Image (spheres, rainbow, N blue to C red):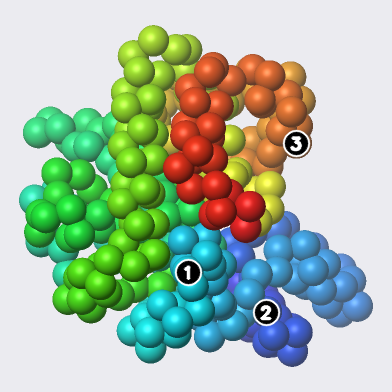
Amino acid sequence: MCSQVLHDLIRRYAQKADTVCSVARLTVRFVDKTGFVSTILEMKRNYAMPATIGAQDPRQNRLLAVLPEPEYQRILPHLQPVPLPLGKVLYESGGRLGWVYFPTTAIVSLLYVMDNGQSAEMAVVGNDGVLGIALFMGGATVTNRAVVQSAGQAYRMSGKRLMEEFSLSGKFQHLLLRYTLALLSQMGQTAVCNRHHSIDQQLCRWLLLSHDRLRGNELEMTQELIADMLGVRREGVSEAAGNLQRDGLIDYNRGHITILDRPGLEARVCECYQVVRNEFHRLLPDTMEQ
């Protein structure tokens, strides 16, 4: 009953401020009514996120943000807002693609899954890009799985409408092709990193790439999910996260990660992070300024 009361109060206070609360772990002591309400208000203030999908703006996606106004207005009616909860699978290996997704506040991992169920992350896509490149690159199926690693929002467009716009050979086509090159560069560098660098360095790279695509400093991610992303054992993730926490770079508790010292992570990460970042700057300089 207490949990239901807590849920109802959070939603009530959040709606008054036109916000909803993201996932948060909070221990509430029922000392008195005043103390309880103030705790809820503090939680709302610290963990507030945009309330509804309608409050989102497609131009929070950096590719959409740099489109010329005529092209943007032409595709705007065909962009459908969708929530992307943590762990949602957008497509599976071998599946046919019907939509492309432009994340605004969510982050999605592209994973290669082996026959034995083991997986490793190939790339991350957030507000910097688009999911479903196979549609405009000439294929209708993919060889990877797309899983939401950080909950948020996105806009989707049907594959049919995407190809109609792509065939006009405007800025939209130009951006999608250059983004594809940047994404392929990230995939290649990830493969090198997973083969040659320590788990500590891989985790730093993953944290920085995710942080680049987030508005804040917090991530909700379990050890199991991180292990799946990096293709390593959970024990390795636990040790690496413990090392970073001990050195004051992150705070990690029950799947909740807070980045405390970004410069420290940048000093500790391998060269792979900067290679990927530089390539995005080279190929998509306009979007990196957003």
Residue at mark 1 to residue at mark 3: CA–CA distance: 34 Å
Left or right: where 75 falls relative to 269: left
Can you tell which quarter of the image residue 230 is in? top left
Quadrant position of the N terminus in the picture: bottom right
Amino acid type at circle 1 is: Leu
Give 131 or 216, whichever is nearer the viewer: 131
Q: Which mark is residue 19?
A: 2
Amino acid type at circle 3 is: Leu
Instruction: Tell me the residue at 77%/62% (across/down).
Output: 46
Circles 3 and 2 in contact, beta carbons < 8 Å: no
Earlier in the chain: of badge 1 and badge 2, it is 2
User: Dot 2: within a 10 Å radius of its alpha carbon, few (fewer than 14), some, or many (20 or more) residues?
Assistant: many
Whether residue 141 is visible here, answered yes or no, is no
Instruction: Tell me the residue at 74%/28% (across/down).
Output: 263
Quadrant position of the C terminus in the picture: bottom right
Left or right: where 170 falls relative to 162: right
Residue linked to disc 1: 67
- Identity of the residue furthest to the front in this view: 169
Q: Which mark is residue 17?
A: none
Give 210 or 178, whichever is nearer the viewer: 178
Residue linked to disc 3: 260
Residue at mark 3 to residue at mark 2: CA–CA distance: 25 Å
Amino acid type at circle 2 is: Thr
Can you tell which quarter of the image residue 80 is in? bottom left
Earlier in the chain: of badge 3 and badge 2, it is 2
Say which element carries label 1.
loop
- Looking at the picture, how far across and down is residue 143, in whole percent? 14, 44
